[in-house]
Amino acid sequence: MLLILFSLSSFSQNNILVFQSDFGLKDGAVSAMKGVAAGVSANIKLYDVTHEVPAYNIWEASYRLVQTAPYWPAGTVFVSVVDPGVGTQRKSVVLLTKTGHYFVTPDNGTLTLVAEQMGIQEIREIDEAVNRRKNSNESYTFHGRDVYAFTGARLASKVISYKEVGKKLPAEVVTIPYQKPTFEKGEVLGGIPILDIQYGNVWTNIDKPLFEKLNVRIGEALMIAVFKENDKIYEGEVRYVNTFAEAKEGSDVGYFNSLLNFSLAINMGNFSEKYKVFSGNEWRIVLSK
């Protein structure tokens, strides 16, 4: 018991609050959430992951969190609002990971990847009788402002402790199924969780140790097949490189991205646009020599 108490107390909030949503920046929704947070504490530090998650895309919200959260210090509170089920019976929760990060969000699949990769220390359901913006009970469609931003700010600034969020829940979250990376019969199988949107590069979830089972060396060719569910969308050969400059302009390459996951690109081009390869939990990729 003493060990558990010590473990929880060591994950102290640090007054940092990081927002993510699918709201975009065309209207005042993001500003309203930050205004609510600033109203809780003028000393709170407000940052963003992104507000350009495609509308209703819970899977991408899940990935963007796990892509960025490990680089923030323990004690950081993330508020993620991609909530097509707003107003339904889905739970509003705060997940504390084993790395000491807090995630304030609907439990609708958004926590799939952070729970898996950062671990579940504890989950609590937000008690809206206490942790809801004053005089907002008649608002049913903007929980990002009225519940999540408000609760996240109160937690980040230590107005409330983690225990004061609400009742403790079983250590499990709603998850979205996806293709996990495996090595089978001389082939590496994986998923395509996300695109490097600016450049059209295709990022997989295949890490370097798994890839190295193919025994492909830098400069050698690699066979690629990409499927959306059961439909083959792309099949071709790419050259394995360390950097884009090792290939001719316009040529297809395979490389390891900044997260050290295998990726596809066209040097000075857009792989996704050219081959109509996109991302999500329904996409999978097969690598072979």
Image: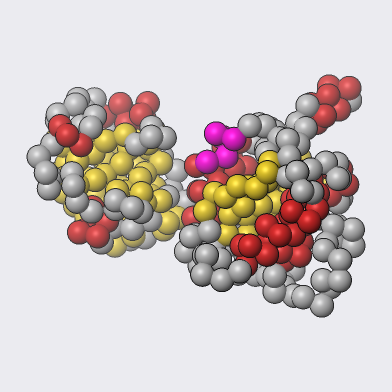
Main SS, magenta residues: helix
Q: Residue at x 19, y 51 (%)?
A: 269
> In the picture shown, does residue 107 fall above or below 218?
below
The quadrant holding residue 257 is top left
Q: Residue at x 23, y 53 (%)?
A: 270
User: What percent of the width, then of the height, locates residue 224?
Assistant: 22, 45
Q: Is residue 210 magenta?
A: no
In depth, the one of 160 and 37 nearer the eye is 37
The colour scheme is secondary structure
Q: Which quadrant does the N terminus fall into?
A: top right
In depth, the one of 250 and 88 nearer the eye is 250
Q: Is residue 107 visible?
A: no
Side of 262 relative to 74 (left or right): left
Magenta part of the chain? 68-72
Q: Is residue 130 visible?
A: yes
The quadrant holding residue 91 is bottom right
> In the picture shown, does residue 36 fall above or below 263?
below
Side of 99 relative to 139 (left or right): left
How many numbered badges does the structure rendering display? Answer: 0
User: What percent of the width, then of the height, locates residue 283?
Assistant: 37, 55
Q: Residue at x 15, y 32 (%)?
A: 246
In the image, farthest residue toward the left: 248
